[in-house]
Amino acid sequence: MNKIIVLFFVFFTTNINASHQSLNPYKSCVLEFYKMLLVDSKVTVADVNKVMGSDDGSEADLLIEDHISKQNQAQLSQYVKCNSATLESYYFKKIRAHVAELSQGCNFETISKLINNSNIYNEGWDLGSYVELKFPNGIILYFEMNTDPPESINCIWLPSGKALDVYNNGNEMLRRPAIINDKDGFTNVRKEANANSQVVGKFVTNELFFFTPVSGSNWWPVYRNETSSCIGYIYKNKITFYRDFPEFIKKDVIKMRTGC
Amino acid sequence: MDIGMFNHTSIDKSTQYIVDPVTGQIYYCALGQVNCVEFTMLKSAYLIANALYSAHMENKYRSEGKLTTYNSNGQVIGSYHATSGCSKSSSGPYYTLPSGDYVAHGFETSTDPKFMRNGIGFKIRLDPNPVWDPTAGYSRTNLLIHPTRLNGTQGCIGLIPRYGDQLPLLDFQSNWNNSIFVNRSIPLHVAYSPYY
């Protein structure tokens, strides 16, 4: 009987380890993030550092900014560093405020399955990839991953296209490269997000531009380049994604986004 | 010694300054055309005299650590999370910036996405250029300091505060821009912990 129990235990633990090892490192990172968000009651600074890149003083900065500590930044940073294994992460507490938007009402088990089935792609970034997490309600979150080991989450892009911002001092939008998908050879850019709005520009076949995917909207904001402001909106069906670009346009994007 | 930097846009091309012989204060001149302008006082305590990139190796190629700046009294002005090198890029791995002494100069703002993070972009050149890299076995060229979107560079020092946090980059930009403007260049020492 004892032998059977031991054999069962060995079989069970081997399978757990095998399934964990087979998970892509980026998906593992996202899974660990959701475990911290939805399962763990206490998340330490060290836990966050493992999943979201090492603390650069941001824990200390946030404590000072919110008047939780009156120590100076250097002293506080040193204190946080020395106690990272036990100290609860204030940075992650701020992330928890977004739990509804990040989980879309799903529990950890459901999200684990979604992560397992998620798409991973790189849109010309040399050192980055996106884990595209699609929820049953149609909402999509994009986890931008640092691909150089140790892998970590660089940024989380919310359904609005904005970055998850615990600092309230950024207003950046996710920008994905695109070309048009239109047999007419051009697609109009509208001033507002509807078909009756004024035409403010157009893109022609194979002309590279950038867009923000906004979950729940059929009209997506577009940009002439990676850093310019929004020029208007395009109907989402008129957009061809990076994976379907001709090779010569992919090369342009890679050239633009890599090498420094 | 205090440094005055104009806020006034109409005189932002002024490059001359005068030193108050009594207080030792420096005032940038508007070529005598502007009698009264607003300006911000910058203490010399915030002018960078030298900098240190002190890092550990995250893997064989990429280092991660702090770029720390010091004033002429040896006090720390700022400390910024930074990385150099990468092990997985599509064009091959790149070793971290070789250890040793450099001179940083030539601050430029940039809208190139390669040199941007959190909406802020700039680049600062490093000399010597090229520099021999004994680990890589070849010379490294066009090395810079700049914000970087993702964890890794081709040997430049990339600034990587947590995503969305603009303040460290704004602080870095302001201090380095002012300090290079006044001192022309900033000595930089690069040193690594020997493990990864």
Image (cartoon, coloured by chain):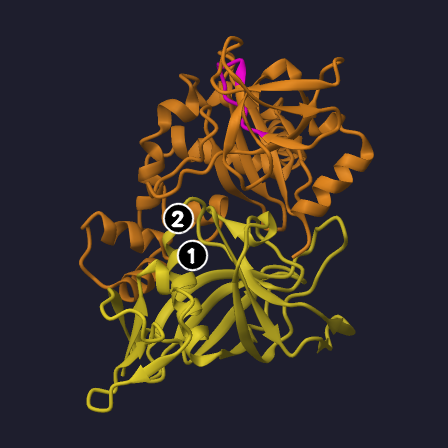
Chain colours: A orange, B yellow
Identified at 57% across, 54% down, the residue is B115
Could you say where residue B32 lies in the image, as x and y percent from the top left? Answer: 32, 75
Could you say where residue A242 lies in the image, as x and y percent from the top left? Answer: 70, 30
State the residue position of label 2.
B165
Q: Which of A116/A1 is in front?
A: A116
Identified at 67% across, 36% down, the residue is A123
Crowding around mark 2 (Cα neighbors within 10 Å: few <14, some 14 to 19, many 20+) is many
Tag of residue B169? 1
- Is residue B81 at all visible to an observer of this figure? yes
Magenta stretch in the rendered image: A211-219
Residue A242 is left or right of residue B33, and the answer is right
Dot 2 amino acid type: Asp
Residue B130 location, quadrant: bottom right
Q: Residue furthest right?
A: A247
Identified at 64% across, 14% down, the residue is A237
Kindly identify which chain the residue marked by label 1 belongs to: B
Quarter of the image that includes the C terminus of chain B: bottom right
Q: Magenta stretch: dominant SS? A: loop
Image vertical order of residue B153 relative to residue B75, above or below:
above
Residue A55 location, quadrant: bottom left
Image vertical order of residue B62 relative to residue A241, above or below:
below
Could you say where residue A146 lies in the image, as x and y percent from the top left? Answer: 58, 45
Quarter of the image that includes the N terminus of chain B: bottom left
Residue B134 location, quadrant: bottom right
Q: Are marks 1 and 2 in contact (CB under 8 Å)?
A: yes
- Is residue A7 at all visible to an observer of this figure? no
Q: Secondary structure at mark 1?
A: helix
Residues beneath discs 1 and 2 located on the same chain: yes
Q: Which of A47/B93 is in front?
A: B93
Dot 1 amino acid type: Leu
